[in-house]
């Protein structure tokens, strides 16, 4: 797609939970793209402003959206991360098919969940252990403050038997155990209506 005088690859996707698009151009054209978009936005009725990565991260946590290198890596299976809906189990011969079929039939050992954390001075970040009493039941993959919700949030892999809404857990945050609770995915706009526009 042409954006001003630039040829861009445009995808209708967004990790913010809002209707959005990603514009991709070569790095040498980023400044030109930024200028073109901000000039075009100046004529809109709604205010438009740049946001930083931490704001983007806050929005994705409110939608329970995982990202590559945190929630999605080679260490987590599709069933653990909720991506198994994209696996063509009927396709013959793909590497790992037998293991994927076993996991589909028995269920994964852990599942990705969203937690609301009763944090005060600090949010969970990455790899903090998650506990139920003396039992370590998982670990945090991402965490931060959800500004739209006004709550501290975390994404975590928990043992499958406790990875259900309303389960009370504790997370080590800066050396202290902090109460948290498993909540249904996408605490902000769970139906996804805002993303559809």
Image (cartoon, rainbow, N blue to C red):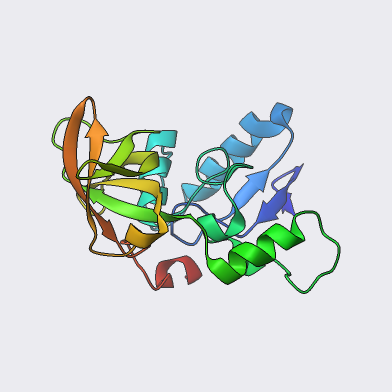
Q: Quadrant of residue 118?
A: top left
Q: Quadrant of residue 73?
A: top right
Which of the pair 109/44 is nearer the observer? 109
Q: Position of residue 192 (x, y in %)?
A: 43, 70
| In the image: residue 165, left or right of residue 126 | left
Which residue in the rendered view is the most extreme toward the left? 120
Point 50% across, 45% down: residue: 71
Point 41% across, 59% down: residue: 160
Q: Quadrant of the N terminus?
A: bottom right
Number of numbered discs visible in the structure rendering: 0
Which of the pair 150/143 is nearer the observer? 143
| In the image: residue 21, left or right of residue 121 | right
Q: Is residue 112 visible?
A: yes
Which of the pair 131/154 is nearer the observer? 131
| In the image: residue 115, left or right of residue 13 | left
Point 80% across, 54% down: residue: 95
- The answer to whether residue 29 is above or below residue 80 is above
- The answer to whether residue 125 is above or below residue 117 is above
Which of the pair 134/75 is nearer the observer? 134
Q: Position of residue 49 (x, y in %)?
A: 40, 42
Q: Position of residue 34 (x, y in %)?
A: 58, 36
Q: Position of residue 81 (x, y in %)?
A: 52, 55
Q: Is residue 186 visible?
A: no
């Amino acid at each position: 797609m042409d954006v001003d005088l630039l040829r861009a690859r445009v995808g209708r996707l967004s990790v913010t939970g809002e209707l959005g698009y990603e514009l991709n151009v070569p790095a040498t054209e980023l400044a030109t793209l930024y200028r073109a978009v901000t000039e075009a936005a100046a004529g809109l009725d709604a205010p438009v402003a740049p946001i930083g990565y931490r704001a983007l991260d806050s929005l994705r946590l409110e939608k329970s959206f995982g990202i590559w290198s945190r929630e999605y890596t080679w260490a987590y299976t599709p069933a653990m991360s909720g991506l198994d809906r994209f696996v063509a189990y009927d396709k013959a011969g793909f590497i790992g098919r037998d293991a994927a079929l076993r996991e589909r039939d028995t269920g994964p050992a852990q599942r990705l969940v969203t937690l609301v954390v009763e944090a005060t001075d600090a949010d969970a970040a990455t790899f903090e252990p998650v506990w139920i009493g003396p039992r370590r039941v998982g670990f945090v993959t991402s965490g931060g403050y959800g500004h739209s919700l006004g709550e501290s949030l975390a994404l975590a892999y928990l043992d499958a038997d406790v990875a259900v809404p309303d389960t009370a857990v504790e997370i080590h945050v800066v050396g202290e155990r902090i109460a948290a609770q498993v909540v249904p995915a996408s605490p902000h706009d769970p139906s996804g209506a805002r993303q559809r526009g």
